[in-house]
Image (spheres, grey):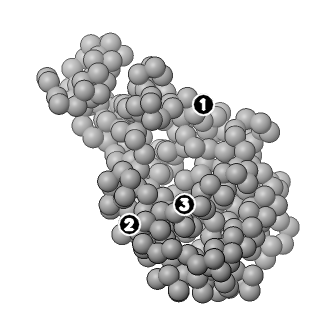
Amino acid sequence: MIHADVRRDALERWLGPHLHGASFTLTPASEDASFRRYWRATLDDGPSYVAMDAPPDQEDCRPFVLVARMLAEAGVHAPEVLAQDLDQGFLLLSDLGTRTYLQEINNTNAAALFADATDALLRWQLATRAGALPPYDEALLRREMNLFPEWYVGRHLKRELSEAQKASLEKIFQLLVKSALAQPVVYVHRDYMPRNLMVCDPNPGVLDFQDAVLGPITYDMVSLVRDAFISWEEERVLDWSARYWEKAKRANLPVAGDFAEFWRAFEWMGLQRHLKVLGIFARINYRDGKPKYLADTPRFIEYSICVSKRYRELAPLARLLDEIA
């Protein structure tokens, strides 16, 4: 079958021998905010696999292969890499199904699903080995936050910050970097949210982990419960976070001994992520032509204002967000 999509044609040819010549149908498996594409290869006799197409001039498959193995070794359910061609940017993966947490979660099952996700996160963090992943250092933290003034404020809002506003934002960045770097370091998935978790057995299946780093211990938990695509009542966020903190303490993970200290670091870490995501969603729209993510930016503005107003040191950010809105 001939397709206008040259890479899809090449992927189909590559899959043939890895599927032992069996007849299969290739259909889109999921959308991605990056240049990667995922296809579901369904054999005529029933079984299915997932094929990743990651153009090597834009994406590197090696981190995905490495972290998939690390997650499996930690006892976390991640896709198994069944075949790979790093030069072409093709991977053949086991299929974790079609039921994402984001699709399935509701007020009734959220506690059980988040309990499973928290337990998997603890196993991942307990597997931490120094030097095994790149560091979530100041340069990376700042590079992420700088997406906010460049893409969200400058490109999306078409606003130019005054010198006073720039200075105010820089002070906020300094505070957030200092807080993040003061936290104990563990493995960080970096996008541990319901869209990247699958309802399956064992639960959850974990996806989109190729950007994993060694970084702040609160990062993945705040990503899970203060998500890009779904919001929860603050009482539930507090309860789930406290349950994680209690389990982490019992597992001898290096969380703060006082919950108030943990919660402050959690909220400040979430604020760093929210500013980053505002910039990323704007960039995805204007650079990559994927507009749907912009619809969720009000959620992140609300997160950011709420957190900023709770802490005297961060109050200037709340004022800045009001000024540029």
- Residue shown at 43% from the left, 65% from the top: 155
* Residue 266 figure quarter: bottom right
Label 1: how many residues lie within 10 Å, few (<14), some (14-19) or many (20+)?
some
- Return the x and y of residue 101 as percentages of the image width and height: 44, 57
Looking at the image, residue 15 sits to the left or right of residue 250; the answer is left
State which tag comes first along the sequence, 2 or 1.
1
Disc 2 to disc 1, how far (Cα)? 31 Å
Three-letter residue code for mark 1: Leu
Question: Which of the 4 quarters of the picture holds residue 74?
Answer: top right
At label 3, which amino acid type do we have? Leu
Q: Secondary structure at mark 3?
A: helix
Tell me which numbered mark, 3 or 2, is placed earlier along the sequence.
3
Instruction: Classify 218 as above or below 200.
Output: below
From this view, report whether residue 323 is shown above or below residue 199. below
Q: Residues within 10 Å of mark 2 (few under 14, many from 20)?
A: some
Residue that label 2 marks: 294
**Dot 3: within a 10 Å radius of its alpha carbon, few (fewer than 14), some, or many (20 or more) residues?**
many
Element on which disc 2 rests: helix
Q: Nearer the viewer, mark 3 or mark 2?
A: 3
In the foreground, 150 or 190: 150
Circle 1 is placed at which residue position?
66
Q: Which three-letter amino acid code belongs to the residue tagged 2?
A: Leu
Image-based side of 235 in relation to 12, left or right: right
Tell me which residue sits at (75%, 42%) in the image. Answer: 128
Residue at the image point whose x is 31% and y is 42% from the top: 29
Q: Which residue is mark 3?
A: 147
Give the residue at the far right of this rendering.
257
